[in-house]
Amino acid sequence: MLKTAAFAISVTAILSGCATTSIPTTRKLSPDMAAQIGKTDVVIAENGAGVRAGWTSAGAAPTYNNYYYVPPGTSPLAAGVGAGIGQAIAIAILDAAPSARARKTANAVNANLDDERLDMQLKDKIAAELGGETVSFGNVDFQAFDRKSPELLDALKIVTSYTLAEDASAVMVQADVSYSSSNLTYKTPYDFGGKIPKNELKGPLYRNTFTYHSNILETPPMSDAVREDLVIAIKAQYDDEMQDLEAQGLKESKFAKKSAKAAKNRDDALNRTKDDKMSKTERAILLVDNWRGNDSPALMQAVSDGQDFIAKMLVQDLNNSAIPQFDRAEPKDKKRPIFGPIGKEDFTEIETDDSGRTVYRVDSGFYAGAYHSVPAAGFAPYGNTFKVAEKNR
C-alpha cells in the first residue's frame, strides 16, 4: 500500500518591519463556511503502515511526540526532559536501544495484524457517529495517497497513525484531519496588520489533530523470575539477528564486524539485567507480546477506544468555530512540570470519566485547538521517530 503524506505546515508568518506573528496550525470552520459545506463525505487514507514502533534518535530533529510523563512535583531536569544536559542525557540513554530494536518490535507486532481491519473499524465508527447541527457526514470511503497525489477536495480527509511506545507500555492512536474545497477559499481569522502572508491565503478550510493515548501497561518489578525471562528474550533476539546476518550473504570481513557488534550488544544487555533497575528497553522486551496483532486484546481495545474518541471529538470540533489562539491567556507557570505533548501550554479539561481518563484541548502554542485523550497514569514515551514493519514498506 502507498504511504500517506504528512502535512507540511508553516506556522510563522513573516510581516513587514521584520516582525513575526505566530499562529496555530489548527484551522476551524467559520459558521459561514460550515453552512456552505453542509454535509460532507469522508475519505480515510489507507493506513498501510499498521502499528509503528516509536524510538528516540539523537540525530533526528525533535518533534512534539518526543515526550514523557512527568509526575506532579517533579522538575523537568530530574525527569530527564527539558533543555540542556537533562535532555542530552535522556537521549543518550535511550539511544542505547538501536533503531534495529524498533524495527524488530514493529515486525513482531504486525506479524498477524490485518491493516485493513484498522481502516474498516474507523469507517464504521465515523459512519455511526451522528453529525452536528451544521456539519454532518455523508459517504465514508477509503483512498490511497502518496506525496505526489493531488490535494483531496470537497471531502474530509483523515490520515491515521498507530504508534507503539518506546517501552511498549502503551499505544498512541492519532488522526490528522483536513478539509479543502474546490470553490471556497480559506479566509484567515487572524489580524496581520493589513499584510496577510501567502500561506494564509490558501490551503484547507479546516485542519486539526486528535490523539488518543492508551492505558499504560504495568511492568512487573525486577525479580529472579523476571530476570530469567529477560535473559531468554535477549539471547533469542541475538540468535534472530545472527540468522538475519547469515542470510544476507555478507563478505567475511563485514559479517565478522556486524556479528561482533551484535555479540557486544547482547553481552551489554545481559549485564544490564544484573541490576534491579528496569530500563525502557527491558520493559519493551517484557511488554511487547501484549500488542501482537489481531489476537491482542490490549491492542484491539486501544485502537477501538482511540477511534471512538476521534469520531466523537471530530464531529464536535467541526461544529465549533472558536478560533485557536497562539498566545497564552495566563502567564506561564515555571513551577508546573512538563505535561506530555502539551508541554506548559494552556489547556482545558473537556471531560473526565470514572477511570480518571481526561480529554484535554490545547489552548495556546502551535498546537492550540488539538485534542488529547489521556489516562490517569499520564503519557508514555514515544520518541522522535518511528519504524514500520518490513511487510508494509
Image (tube, rainbow, N blue to C red):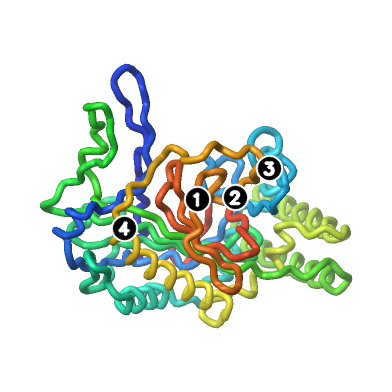
Q: Earlier in the sequence, mark 4 or mark 3?
A: 3
Q: Is residue 204 above or below residue 10?
A: below
Give the side of residue 155 with respect to residue 238, left or right. left
Amino acid at dot 4? Asn
Q: CA distance from mark 1 to mark 4?
A: 16 Å
Amino acid type, callout 1: Phe
User: Residue at label 1?
Assistant: 347
Dot 2 or dot 4, earlier in sequence: 4
Q: Could you say which quadrant of the image residue 105 lies in?
A: bottom right
Disc 3 to disc 2, how far (Cα)? 10 Å
Helix, strand or loop under label 4: loop
Q: Which residue is mark 3?
A: 76
Whether label 1 touches label 3, CB < 8 Å: no
Residue under pointer 2: 339
First in sequence: mark 1 vs mark 3: 3
The secondary structure type at the circle numbered 1 is strand
Q: Name the mark on residue 320.
A: 4
261 relative to 83, above or below? below
N-terminal of the two: label 1 or label 2?
2
- Assign a secondary structure to mark 3: loop
Q: Disc 1 vs disc 2: Cβ atoms closer than 8 Å? A: yes
Quadrant position of the C terminus in the picture:
bottom left
Disc 1 from disc 2: Cα separation: 10 Å
Q: Which one is in front in this view, the residue at disc 2 or the one at disc 4?
A: 4
In the rendered image, the residue lying farthest to the top is: 17
